[in-house]
Amino acid sequence: MPEKGTYHMVVDPFDVDFTGRLTIGQLGNHLLNAAGFHANERGFGIERLNEDDNTWVLSRVAMEFTELPREYRHFTVETWIENVMRLFTARNFCIRDQFGNPIGYARTIWAMINRQSRKPVDLFSINDGRLGEWALKDEQCPIEGPTKIKVSVDEPVDVVKVKYSDIDINGHMNSCRYIEHVLDLFSINYLKEHNVKRFEIAYMAECLCGEQLALFKEETEPGVFQIEIRKIGTNEISCRSKVIFN
Amino acid sequence: MPEKGTYHMVVDPFDVDFTGRLTIGQLGNHLLNAAGFHANERGFGIERLNEDDNTWVLSRVAMEFTELPREYRHFTVETWIENVMRLFTARNFCIRDQFGNPIGYARTIWAMINRQSRKPVDLFSINDGRLGEWALKDEQCPIEGPTKIKVSVDEPVDVVKVKYSDIDINGHMNSCRYIEHVLDLFSINYLKEHNVKRFEIAYMAECLCGEQLALFKEETEPGVFQIEIRKIGTNEISCRSKVIFN
């Protein structure tokens, strides 16, 4: 039976920024953890997939929030599958404060790949085609899905090197670090005066330890920033992001 | 009555490194969280101190471990006050795996400062001098305390800029990020072949967003590294660290 998963979380004091509120990078971690719990509990988590040498790959994220919870506050992440297509599945999230009021939503798009071939796997072939049975089509997620991101500038605004602390258990830069690298392109003074209203990221190529990344940033409308991270040398696009401030 | 605090924790999947084990930086966060809980529960936590415009400042840490827990594993942090002197207090930790076996220990040294004057506060003057009553002098912590750290090299091995994501609720670089910056000085190949046996850090001057830091590293004996982080411009020493590998 299709159903939401509901997970209770607490804001650790080291997961807040200078405003005392949960960082967007750490919120991203919490959403991915909730996704992992929900999938594991229903037999399509990474551990089960790994037995067949398949794995989930996060492709796109769009998040919107009114205000993020403060340190030590309890909050809840609800997650559900919106739909399953042959090559992609959409998973949505609702974030609620300690009183149960919605304070944010997220939409994510995932693909499945074979770990040997790195090629996409047909989602209709997984679990005897039963993945689609988990879709909760009528659940509301009142934010726009991922949109087009386009960066036209040629000069990078920063260069970063992928280091040990950026690397996750798969040997790639972890998803949260990309978000941090994007937000680190803004000055603390700008962030003192503007709140992020919407954050989007599209993951395109994994980064390995030692790689150098060039970061491009363009303000296409007031408070709307398009960002691109490219690998230096190959010029391969690693990710694109859009940040919209209040 | 003096007593240990015991806190149950879980390794989040984004808090492990490429080996699949909890990072030392995240272990540091967990120890500081445990210290915060223990102090709050006994009336000498940051919130209570802030009412008098005082706060705790972490001065030194020494940690040793056999192996750190893997993702999703439960573990326990025990913490207690070893002693209270006029200007410093020593707080120790034992880390236990899910079976209750010790897998690591830590010793930390703290001072208290007034948030206005930034001057040290006499610990005997706090809580009517009752802080010392919490000391558990007979509890075992079988590792050496913080030792002398000395770096003699003149050429930095890396330069980093303090960014938004490094900054905590106090507006300073968070304690965990220093640990990450230190470990990022080692190549992933070195870290694949060597495990950290002991990690020490001495916090000397807080870093603000936008400051540039020069990192110095010297291998004084095989597998023994002394590290210093200095602010570029003022040359002020921000922290010193020692990493000992197996």
Image (cartoon, coloured by chain):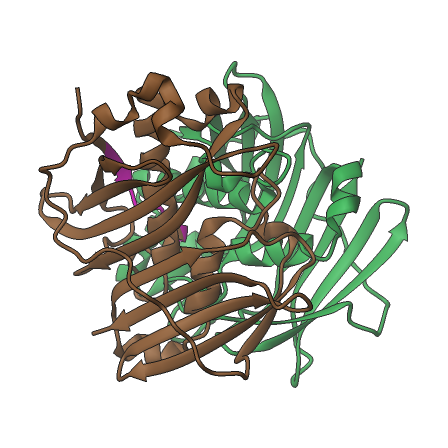
Chain colours: A brown, B green
From the viewer's perspective, is residue A206 above or below residue A197? above
From the viewer's perspective, is residue B34 above or below residue B110? above
Residue B76 seen in the current view:
yes
Q: Position of residue B20 (x, y in %)?
A: 59, 33
Observer-nearest residue: B64 or A27? A27
Q: Which residues are the magenta region?
A: A7-14
Observer-nearest residue: A183 or B26? A183
Q: Position of residue A211 (x, y in %)?
A: 67, 60
The picture quadrant where one finds residue A20 is bottom left
Relative placement, left or right, of A97 versus B146 is left
Task: Based on the picture, tell me whether residue A12 belongs to the magenta stretch.
Answer: yes
The quadrant of the rendering that contains the N terminus of chain B is: top left
The quadrant of the rendering that contains the C terminus of chain B is: top right
The picture quadrant where one finds residue B131 is top left
Q: Position of residue A226 (x, y in %)?
A: 37, 73
The picture quadrant where one finds residue A139 is top left
Relative placement, left or right, of B65 versus A50 is right
Q: Position of residue A29 (x, y in %)?
A: 39, 45
From the viewer's perspective, is residue A222 above or below residue A43? below
Which residue is at 20% across, 51% downward? Answer: A105
Which residue is at 36% across, 18% downward? Answer: A127
Observer-nearest residue: B151 or A52? A52
Task: Based on the picture, tell me whether residue B157 belongs to the magenta stretch.
Answer: no
Which residue is at 13% across, 36% downward? Answer: A137
